[in-house]
Image: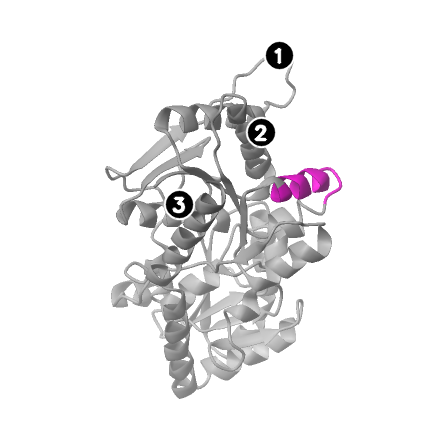
Amino acid sequence: MRIGIVCYPTYGGSGVVATELGKALALRGHQVHFISYKQPARLDIFTGNTFYHEVYVSSYPLFEYPPYETALSSHMVDVVKFEKLDLLHVHYAIPHASAAILAKQILATEGIHIPVITTLHGTDITLVGKDACFGPVVQYSINQSDGVTTVSDSLKEETLAYFKIYKEIESIPNFIDLTRFKKEPRAHFKTAIAPNGEKIIIHTSNFRKVKRIDDVVKIFAAIRKEMPAKLLLVGDGPERIHIEKLCRELGLNDAVSFLGKQNQIEEILSVGDLFLMPSETESFGLAALEAMACELPVISSNAGGIPELNLEGVTGFLCNVGDVEGMAQKALYLLKNDVVLNEFKANALKRAERFNIDAIVPKYEAFYNKVLNQNK
């Protein structure tokens, strides 16, 4: 198949999933064309089957806000026509699905039919989609898509509950490349971070309020009162300045490291003992899956699709959103008993193996074929 993949090029979950899916499809013999305003962060290797098409937005004095969606639609029309694509797979409803529907309509006037598959990733429904400014467009774009998927059953249910959707939605979970995300010996790195054998706690995110990173710091502060520990914060975003200030106020500067955005995050996860994800909402929890593949138990909220991944009392523990005390108690239960901690680490890896990329990518291929057959 010749597949166009439209995604955000950022480190966020939707961009990561879209890019890794495209790379995996290319390795399976499909021709994959990425369309975005910047090369996706995870698109670090090009093969004979992967191509990147950059969307340029012209700047005119008339436009206070550059019309990216219009430029994206025009570029999709161009790529579909000249690369002879079989389908467009767009990730995230706004603006990708709406732009794809416009492109589809333009192409139809020239006798070209291009199926559009939309994958919903979370905040495009739970936050952006519920904004009155975007809601009608999100609903229309979903209903006009030829195929719709979500990354968890929870997100599917929330989409159907909030919008009037007439399309069948298929839930296909996120996935992990276990050849990349696996625990590797990093003794020198671990010693440099925790020279006295302190336990290492890790959190990775895009530092938005919805991730509740202040809860991460407060949980860690409670842990530090009971035992020596270090906290690694991976990522960057609008909340970083606030979190740095909070660490100073709590006297944690010497125990917290801000590592910024990292491409080889699996190397950092390999030195950890526990992963924290107290998010207000998560459609799936891809960062937790990456941690589990590197044998890290997860202490998380019970929001959204996280319970579909993190199994209570098996791979970690689930608490209500904002329950800092409860999460700290569960974390200490694991960190203070190496036998129990090692059992949970083994369980985390075993659970992650169920989301191996080799098991999930065929589900997308089957869905593509289903949509193509319906549109013959």
Predominant SS along the magenta part? helix
Amino acid type shown at disc 1 = Pro
Image quarter (top left, top right, bottom left or bottom right) of the N terminus: top left
C-alpha separation, residue under disc 2 versus residue under disc 1:
25 Å
Which one is nearer the viewer's eye here, 339 or 69? 69
- Which residue is located at x 37 percent, y 24 percent? 82
Q: Is residue 87 above or below residue 213?
A: above
Q: Earlier in the sequence, mark 1 or mark 3?
A: 3
* Mark 2, other Cα within 10 Å: few <14 / some 14–19 / many ≥20: many
Q: Magenta segment: does it hold 19?
A: no
Q: Position of residue 352 (x, y in %)?
A: 40, 69
Residue lying at the far top of the rendered structure:
61
Q: Are marks 3 and 2 in contact (CB under 8 Å)?
A: no
Q: Is residue 321 above or below residue 99?
A: below
Amino acid type shown at disc 3 = Thr
Query: Can residue 254 be seen in the rendering of this structure?
Result: no
Q: Which residue is mark 3?
A: 19
Amino acid type shown at disc 2 = Leu
Q: Secondary structure at mark 1?
A: loop
Numbered circle sitting on residue 316: none
C-alpha separation, residue under disc 1 versus residue under disc 3:
34 Å
Q: Which residue is mark 2?
A: 102
Q: Secondary structure at mark 2?
A: helix
- Bounds of the magenta segment: 131-143
Q: Which residue is mark 1?
A: 61
